[in-house]
């Protein structure tokens, strides 16, 4: 009977093994500077990833104020001084995510480590933060393109880690997020119906307070805006020279860059890079045909 029971239990365990997550490997933060956090029902694991590219802070034009503020905040954090969680919000393609990548490339030698967390894995954020609490390194936990729908409760885990739990985030962890929305949660006209005027002061209703309270927990807000034409053309010139040669930029390229932005319906750093890739690609193809 005992042998039969043991056999059946072994058979059950063998079948269940396919559903179990792989045993997580220990991260070597002296070797790796970036990782992805993957949550699963039994916990989570860190997957090391190489830097995506060699993008530098000098490659990012038109966002000097934002660069300076984020670099200063991150350097203070790396030195053990007080620093703020940061929310980078604004128009699409304006350099928010690129600034995070350039920050890692520039400050990794000074000890910066970045862990990216997908919005759908935010419920495992408290577990990740606890894993990092006793690490000797300093981490920026990064959420890209962050936004929530009205029925989405994942933001509650983020609120708790930012400034809601009794313990709070450890001193070696900061949270950086990028979003097209300033308040991360959708806003509707109905939300304002609960607002009221008391004397000369406007008091928001509960719905508005809930939505504002999330972004309000980021101490550093950095707004990103569409480029004007001069900045856009400066960025186009930079990327054409980077992807090709300085002589590839001229009056013809300038006119084509303006046409490219008009067709795309906006000017941004992303649009400038996309134009440069198309211009240099076509130019080199024509030269070799």
Image (cartoon, rainbow, N blue to C red):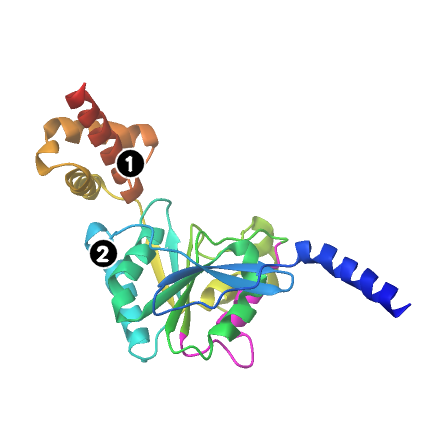
Name the quarter where the C terminus is drawn: top left
- Crowdedness near tag 1: few (<14), some (14–19) or many (≥20) residues, C-alpha within 10 Å: some
Look at 34% across and 70% down and name the residue there. Answer: 30
Mark 1 element type: helix
Look at 40% across and 68% down and name the residue there. Answer: 28
Mark 2 element type: helix
Q: Which mark is residue 57?
A: 2
Q: Residue furthest top?
A: 289
Residue 122 visible somewhere in the drawing: yes
User: Image quarter for residue 267?
Assistant: top left
* Residue stretch rendered in magenta on the structure: 152-172
The foreground one among 132 and 72 is 132
Residue 210 visible somewhere in the drawing: no
Left or right: where does residue 52 sit relative to residue 148? left
When the figure is inspected, residue 267 is found, relative to residue 62, above or below; the finding is: above
265 in the magenta segment = no
- Which of the two labelled residues, at mark 1 and mark 2, occupies the earlier sequence position? 2
Look at 78% across and 59% down and name the residue there. Answer: 12
What's the distance in space between the residues labelled 1 and 2, CA to CA? 18 Å
Query: Which residue has dot 1 on it?
Result: 274
Look at 29% across and 38% down and name the residue there. Answer: 271
The foreground one among 37 and 140 is 37
Name the quarter where the N terminus is drawn: bottom right
From the top left corner, tell me how far across and down residue 227 is, in percent. 26, 44
């Amino acid at each position: 009977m005992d042998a039969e029971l043991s056999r059946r239990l072994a058979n059950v365990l063998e079948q269940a093994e396919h559903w179990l997550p792989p045993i997580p490997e220990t991260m070597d933060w002296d070797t790796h500077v970036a990782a992805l956090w993957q949550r699963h029902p039994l916990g989570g694991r860190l997957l090391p990833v190489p830097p995506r590219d060699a993008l530098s802070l000098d490659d990012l034009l038109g966002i000097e104020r934002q660069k300076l503020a984020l670099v200063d905040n991150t350097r203070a954090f790396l030195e053990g001084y007080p620093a703020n969680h940061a929310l980078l919000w604004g128009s699409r393609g304006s350099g928010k995510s690129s600034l995070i990548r350039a920050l890692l490339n520039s400050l990794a030698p000074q000890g910066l480590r970045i862990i990216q967390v997908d919005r759908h894995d935010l419920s495992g954020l408290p577990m990740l933060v606890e894993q990092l609490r006793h690490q000797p390194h300093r981490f920026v936990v990064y959420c890209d393109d962050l936004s929530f729908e009205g029925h989405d409760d994942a933001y509650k885990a983020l609120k708790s880690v930012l400034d809601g739990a009794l313990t709070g985030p450890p001193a070696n962890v900061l949270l950086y997020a990028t979003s097209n929305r300033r308040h991360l949660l959708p806003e509707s006209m109905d939300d304002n119906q609960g607002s009221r005027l008391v004397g000369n002061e406007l008091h928001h209703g509960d719905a508005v307070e809930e939505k504002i309270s999330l972004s309000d927990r980021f101490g550093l807000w950095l707004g990103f805006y569409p480029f004007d034409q001069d900045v856009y053309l400066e960025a186009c010139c930079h990327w054409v020279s980077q992807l090709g040669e300085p002589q590839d930029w001229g009056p013809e390229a300038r006119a084509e860059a303006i046409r490219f932005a008009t067709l795309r319906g906006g000017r941004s750093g992303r649009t400038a890079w996309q134009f440069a890739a198309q211009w240099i690609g076509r130019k080199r193809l024509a030269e070799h045909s």
